[in-house]
Image (spheres, rainbow, N blue to C red):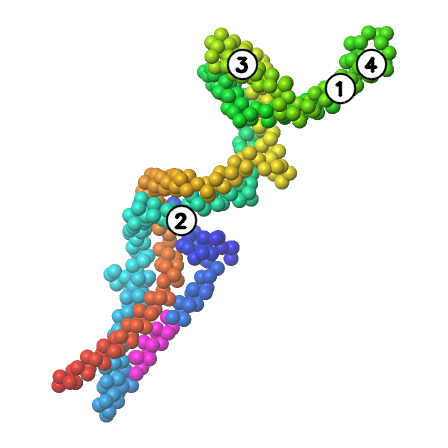
Amino acid sequence: MTQPTPAESAGQVVPVRPAGPKPAMAIPHDEAVRQKQLDTMKRRATLLLAGATVLFVITRAFESRYPWIGYIRATMEAAMVGGLADWFAVTALFRHPLGIPIPHTAIVPSRKDRVGRTLGAFVQRNFLTREVIEFRLRSLQVGKRLAEWLAEPVNARTISRNAAVALSSAAQMLRDDDVQEVIDRSLAKRVRSMHLAPLLGKVLGVMTEDDRHQEVLDEVIVLASRTVNDNSDLIRERIEQETPWWIPSAVDEKIFKRVLGAIQRLLSELSADRDHPLRGRFDEALDRFIERLNTSPEFAARVDAWKEDFLDNEAARRFSQSMWEEAKEALARYAEHPGEATPSAIETALVTFGQKAVDDPELMAKIDNFAVDVAVFLVARYQDEVADLISSTVAGWDPELTSHRVELAIGRDLQFIRINGTIVGGLAGLIIYLLSKLAS
């Protein structure tokens, strides 16, 4: 026997495509348990009916000798009628009773197509409506759950890594020349359409607010200091080349140490002293530069000319090409070795968004509204297709196997109808017999 699929293991009826021969439906692993429970209930209902029949025969034989037995006989007679009637009703749902093709029997296999259409229409009218979807989504608090889920770094990391794998796979499938052409065309068009001077002025203006540009200057100073230390040998060689040949090497070494020491002291002072005169000159020069960017048409035209020269230069193409190559390589590295990388920008952004959304009721409400709008749009767009899917799927099921599966699903409960019919029928027969005796 083949292994059951997850859908079959859940006890679902597996649809079979209507085109071509219909293969047998696989058996769920719990079908044997359901079949056993159904058979047990069938035996109980049948034994109850058989017991009523036996008692009826016995009491019928002795009723003339013992008149009081008539009460038992009437009860068993009515119980037989009730039990037989309910046996016929339950059996007629799934098959022809005793194999006799009585009209309006075997309802499930013969009417399954209509049941499928009715079920599809029922789901469409009662489940796929804006009111139901909106109420359910708002009660689920989609925004809160999503924000709390994204705020967990593990979940954000999973999304970012899966996104990196998908993007890396897509990037490998693209031709570099095609991508390069698109980048060059779109980048050049976008850059040519904007005036860089006022934009650059606004960016620098934002950077200078609250002395944020000083933080950039601190990083530049650290970088300059590191560069000087890393290139001290190059500075020594340069000094030796620039000094006359008759200057002794010891003097060159002293000059080198003086120059290197002076540079390092200056950088250290700049780093430690927030009020250093050079910092003030830097502020003044930057303010004048921003002012020219924002107010000088001549300087703005010169910046645009620099922009055009850059776009027409081969360096621009190499820059855009390097952007694509580095992005593709970074995606590939991250997709292949996600455990070795620090949190990506996507991951950090997702975590930050989740944390801020948790503390922002207004943003949470917007997320909920967005989820509702998307769900309602999809429902309105595809509710007819869902109804058709249900209808066509049910139509593709094998009639006999469908009847068998439905009986396994609800047949055990239906056997209680037979049991109740036998008991209630017997009680009704007893009451009728009592009334007839009283009336006579």
Looking at the rendered image, the disc whose residue lies closer to the viewer, 2 or 1, is: 1
N-terminal of the pair, mark 4 or mark 2, is: 2
Q: Is residue 243 above or below residue 88?
A: above
Secondary element at image label 4: helix
How far across and how far down the image is residue 132, in percent? 32, 48
Report the disc number at residue 252.
4
N-terminal of the pair, mark 3 or mark 1, is: 1
Looking at the rendered image, the disc whose residue lies closer to the viewer, 4 or 3, is: 3
Residue furthest left as drawn: 440
Magenta highlight: main SS: helix
Residue 54 in which image quadrant: bottom left
- Residue type indicated by callout 3: Arg
Residue furthest bottom as drawn: 65
Q: Is 112 in the magenta?
A: no
How far across and how far down the image is residue 143, in percent? 42, 43
Q: Residue at x 74, y 19 (%)?
A: 262
Q: Which residue is mark 1?
A: 260
N-terminal of the pair, mark 4 or mark 3, is: 4
N-terminal of the pair, mark 3 or mark 2, is: 2
Residue 430 in which image quadrant: bottom left
Give the Cα distance between marks 2 and 1. 66 Å
Asked whether disc 3 touches disc 1, contact meaning CB atoms under 8 Å apart, the reply is no
Q: Which residues are magenta?
A: 42-55
Q: Is 46 in the magenta?
A: yes
How far across and how far down the image is residue 51, in percent? 33, 80
Looking at the rendered image, the disc whose residue lies closer to the viewer, 3 or 2, is: 3
Quarter of the picture containing the C terminus is bottom left
- Residue 144 visible at all: yes
**Depth check, front residue: 142 or 245:** 245
- Residue type indicated by callout 4: Asp
Give the Cα distance between marks 3 and 1. 31 Å
Q: Is residue 350 above or below residue 282?
A: below
